[in-house]
Image (tube, grey):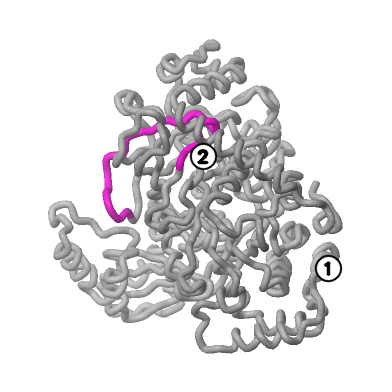
């Protein structure tokens, strides 16, 4: 487990010479593997298949111990999570036979992707995820050393959180990948030996599963060390923005703690209190400074005002996360936004070799040693993508279209397919990428979007099918009033704290009976009850998502909306109302014709872990 607070503060950092040697080796490694992409990939595939030659899944498909690429592609199908869900369910319920992997499955990662509205469970083997995580982390550190003039100096105020570990019926831990990292011995080792991982948050504050206590104590420690902070961030921008909005709400309490040198009694976790009191000292001058800044009418640039030496914000701003860029720019005075890594619950994938590029120019170099990569050509939307619908199954011709990492074409869009050391074979991750360029012989990819996702605030990836089913469940409440939903669309309103889903509804009213507001409120709640586990957790437990809102619009609104889209070049013949809108002028048109709005009156039902193990599908 992680070390003590004393270890954090007293252990020596790695020597400058040792760090320079490590950086040199990592940069040489990047040069080598990106120059010999196909050779490395063939070796990786052979390693995976030889290690797992006798597992049930490969025997089921008659691979018969072959490790060559041609046989592999001939006999193994391209799959989705649903294809192996019965196998994963066996593992979750305690079957220890080598079903997918020859090595023992040590834990299941709870993916924020969903199957049937509930979380996917991704198997990993002991040491494998950590080994890949360490390698990616070391490569990133080496890349940052070349572009960040303050590398190895100061501290990072990174907001990191865990979710409590759950157990499957068979006793396996089910955790988020980030939780697995933060609770691993390597995480604390990095903090002790690598200056770049010198954070303002003590480990105990990160490992506190009470979200309020964790957020409060991490923010307090960040404020106490404000002059030492050179970089800020969080894994996802939603987490970082939540931290700033938490400060907006609780700054007076935090100032009182700093002024008096005492910790708020709401922080009851003994380990957290001990860790924070190592940092917290009475500082009326700092408290007055924070109070003065937070009392101002505008919070624009609050990051650079409270943490004046901050050089950049590190968080993922590609794909759907790009929707947070304006908010991040507002709070940070447009500091550089640094997206360093591309990873998923299935596998670590790649890194950004130009981390200080503009968010719109971010590309990830896939590291050929991480897994075996394949790519399914995607012939669909170009330009602005609101959502992508990927076919659930592939015919024989489509399966033959997959190409290897060394054979992708610049400018082409692909769906990512991986074969991993932990027992996933030709598995469709669901990400759509575009080839942007090359590092030596290794292609670099823009991340476009995730499969079918149309609404997302944090981990709540809501896809088209989920939203359609949820709305279908809700409109039944209108039937007694002889009212029908004729058109609808949706978007995420990021201007509220917390952000929330908005649905624009146009109704056909055939009767003379008016619909009471309570009916629309029930519709809101019905939709929320029908959405996925992570949405309901965000609403009911994390409080990171606000009540869902239905905005009823005037009759004819969606005709006007169609006319406007056609005037911009949409095809009249192929026009269909999008289930989600993000383009500001579209949202303005819809908002200008709202006649009434209604919110969900309460939080939807949510039971920790229940649906993961009781989903019969």
Q: Residue at x 50, y 25 (%)?
A: 40
Q: Could one spot residue 507 in this view of the protein?
A: no
Tell me if mark 2 has few (under 14), some (14-19) or many (20+) residues whose alpha carbon lies within 10 angstroms of its own.
many
- N-term-proximal mark, 2 vs 1: 1
Q: Which residue is mark 1?
A: 278
Which label sits in the foreground, 2 or 1?
1
Q: Nearer the viewer, residue 304 or 391?
A: 304
Numbered disc total: 2
Residue 411 percent location from the top left of the image: 29, 41
Any mark on residue 349, and which?
2
- Asked if the residues shown at circle 2 and circle 1 are in contact, with their CB atoms under 8 angstroms apart, the answer is no
- Residue 148 picture quarter: bottom right
Tell me if mark 1 has few (under 14), some (14-19) or many (20+) residues whose alpha carbon lies within 10 angstroms of its own.
few
> Is residue 108 toward the left or the right of residue 507 in the image?
right
Q: Residue at x 78, y 59 (%)?
A: 204
Residue span colored magenta: 365-385
Query: Any magenta on residue 371?
Result: yes
Q: Nearer the viewer, residue 281 or 555?
A: 281
Q: Residue at x 52, y 75 (%)?
A: 497
């Amino acid at each position: 487990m992680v070390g003590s607070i004393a270890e954090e503060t007293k252990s020596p950092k790695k020597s400058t010479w040792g760090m320079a040697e490590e950086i040199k080796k990592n940069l040489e490694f990047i040069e080598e593997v990106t120059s010999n992409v196909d050779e490395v990939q063939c070796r990786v595939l052979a390693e995976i298949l030889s290690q797992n030659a006798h597992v049930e899944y490969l025997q089921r498909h008659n691979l018969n111990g072959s490790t060559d690429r041609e046989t592999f592609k001939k006999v193994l199908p391209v799959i989705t999570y649903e294809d192996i869900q019965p196998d994963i369910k066996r593992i979750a319920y305690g079957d220890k036979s080598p079903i997918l992997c020859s090595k023992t499955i040590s834990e299941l990662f709870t993916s924020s992707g969903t199957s049937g509205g509930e979380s996917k469970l991704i198997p990993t083997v002991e040491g494998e995820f950590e080994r890949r995580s360490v390698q990616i982390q070391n490569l990133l550190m080496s890349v940052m050393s070349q572009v960040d003039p303050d590398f190895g100096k100061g501290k990072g105020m990174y907001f990191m959180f865990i979710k409590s570990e759950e157990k499957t019926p068979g006793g396996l831990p089910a955790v988020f990948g980030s939780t697995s990292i933060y609770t691993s011995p390597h995480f604390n080792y990095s903090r002790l030996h690598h200056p770049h991982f010198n954070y303002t948050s003590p480990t105990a504050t990160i490992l506190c599963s009470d979200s309020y206590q964790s957020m409060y104590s991490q923010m307090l420690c960040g404020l106490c060390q404000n002059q030492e902070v050179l970089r800020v961030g969080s894994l996802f921008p939603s987490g970082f923005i939540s931290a700033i909005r938490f400060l907006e709400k609780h700054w007076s309490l935090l100032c009182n703690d700093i002024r008096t040198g005492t910790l708020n009694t709401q922080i009851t976790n003994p380990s957290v209190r001990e860790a924070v009191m190592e940092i917290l000292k009475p500082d009326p001058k700092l408290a007055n400074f924070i109070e003065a800044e937070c009392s101002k009418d505008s919070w624009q640039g609050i990051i650079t005002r409270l943490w004046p030496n901050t050089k950049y914000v590190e968080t993922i701003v590609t794909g759907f996360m790009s929707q947070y860029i304006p908010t991040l720019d507002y709070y940070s005075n447009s500091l550089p936004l640094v997206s360093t890594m591309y990873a998923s619950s299935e596998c670590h994938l790649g890194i950004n070799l130009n981390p200080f590029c503009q968010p719109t120019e971010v590309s990830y170099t896939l590291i050929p040693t991480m897994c075996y990569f394949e790519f399914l050509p995607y012939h669909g939307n170009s330009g602005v993508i609101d959502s992508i619908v990927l076919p659930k199954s592939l015919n024989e011709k489509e399966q033959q279209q997959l190409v290897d990492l060394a054979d992708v074409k610049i400018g082409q869009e692909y769906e990512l397919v991986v074969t991993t050391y932990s027992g996933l074979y030709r598995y469709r991750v669901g990400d759509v990428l575009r080839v942007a360029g090359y590092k030596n012989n290794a292609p670099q990819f823009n991340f476009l979007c995730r499969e079918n996702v149309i609404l997302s605030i944090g981990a709540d990836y809501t896809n088209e099918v989920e939203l359609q089913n949820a709305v279908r469940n809700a409109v039944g409440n209108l039937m007694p009033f002889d009212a029908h939903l004729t058109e609808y669309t949706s978007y995420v309103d990021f201007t509220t704290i917390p952000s929330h889903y908005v649905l624009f509804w146009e109704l056909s009213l055939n009767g003379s009976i008016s619909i009471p507001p309570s009916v629309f409120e029930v519709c809101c709640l019905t939709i929320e009850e029908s959405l996925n586990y992570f949405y309901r957790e965000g609403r009911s437990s994390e409080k990171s998502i606000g009540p869902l809102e239905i905005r009823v619009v005037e009759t004819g609104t969606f005709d006007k909306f169609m006319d406007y889209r056609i005037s911009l070049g949409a095809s009249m013949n192929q026009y269909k109302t999008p289930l989600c809108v993000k383009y500001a002028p579209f949202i303005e048109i819809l908002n200008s014709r709202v006649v009434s709005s209604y919110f969900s009156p309460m939080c939807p039902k949510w039971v920790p872990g229940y649906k993961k193990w009781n989903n019969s599908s």
